[in-house]
Image: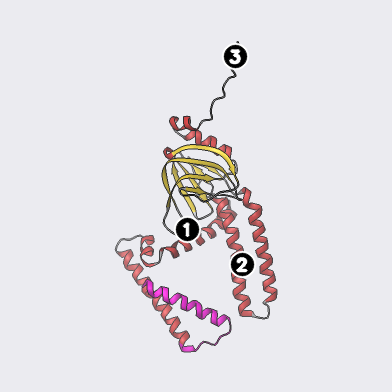
Amino acid sequence: MRYAAYALLPAELVLVVCLVAGVRVPTPVLAVAEAAVALLLTVEAVAFLRLRRRGLSARAALERLVPEPVLRLVGHELRLLASLARWVARRPHGAGPGTTAFPHARDQAALMYGFAFVCVVETVGMSYLLADWPAVHAVVLVLDVYTVLFVLGLHAASATRPHLLTGDALRVRQAAHVDLRIPLERIAAVRHESLFSHEKAEGELNLAVGSQTSLTLELTAPVPAPRLFGAPRPVHTVRLHADDARALVRALRGALDPATRARTAPSPVQDPPSSA
């Protein structure tokens, strides 16, 4: 069934492009294509219901029917749209009793608003240039509007998904694609340091905001860092950014156990030697 979807969906996309471009597609070809799509959706729906009756959850059933990269991409887009609603309603994701939130989106706001403004200008310009081609204008307008929503959604996801500190873990997040839970017992060292250049290295995760990180975590054991595509990769060093990095450092040191807190505490100031 998956192979049929892999073959049918690109063919459907080619037909849509041909129709938008004004290419005449024979009616029998269109009828066969639409019938094939309807048949595929029907078979998928029946298979989904059968899997649900076997006791599988909705997510598990979807994972059996839909390729994992597609599920991840669709889930990411849905999280962006949900973040827009949360942003408007001022409802952070995951915050609750016993949880301390540390925002991290402030330093990227100007850049993201600038991108959104450029996209709006491009949308208006393309609408004017394509006014004489209604079909092309409609397609480009939809893509342009979605691009504006996508850019705003990226910032909304960062604004509504702060880092979260609980009694046993630090939840590190970036936009809608990174959500990493780090148990406190795995944090060996935490320090405040501002870095503006990050070279890729094995076992390191750099979650820069506005091209900078302000906090570095050294771990006693690797934790699996999720990726939008591909399997999670183990990391032992995590660099992240917070609007108030010093407050996050203080909160982390206060939450760590005494042994770890002793390792991360600053070195005591040595008294000058007394003169004889």
* Mark 3, other Cα within 10 Å: few <14 / some 14–19 / many ≥20: few
Rendered-image quadrant of the N terminus: bottom left
Which residue corresponds to mark 2?
A: 145
Please tell me whether residue 208 is drawn above or below residue 14 in the rendered image: above
Query: Could you tell me which secondary element the residue under label 3 belongs to?
Result: loop
Query: Where 11 sits versus 265, above or below?
Result: below
- Name the image quarter holding the C terminus: top right
Residue 68 on the magenta segment: no
Callout 1 crowding tier (Cα within 10 Å): few <14, some 14–19, many ≥20: some
Disc with the residue nearer the chain's start (3 vs 1): 1
Between discs 2 and 1, the one toward the N terminus? 2
Residue occupied by mark 1: 228
Q: Are marks 3 and 1 in contact (CB under 8 Å)?
A: no
- In the image, residue 134 lies at what x, y percent? 64, 79
Amino acid type indicated by mark 3: Ser
Q: Which residues are magenta?
A: 1-28
Residue lying farthest front? 276
Tell me if label 2 and label 1 are in contact, CB under 8 Å: no
Kindly identify which residue carries mark 3: 274
Q: Residues within 10 Å of mark 2 (few under 14, many from 20)?
A: few
Residue 31, quarter of the rendered image: bottom left
Amino acid type assigned to the residue bearing label 1 in the image: Leu
Residue occupying image coordinates x 38% and y 64%: 62
Residue 23 counted in the magenta span: yes
- Front in this rendered view, residue 86 or 169: 169
Q: Is residue 154 left or right of residue 31?
A: right
Side of 236 relative to 92 (left or right): left
x and y percentages locating residue 48 in the rendered image: 36, 68
Determine the CA span between mark 3 and mark 1: 60 Å
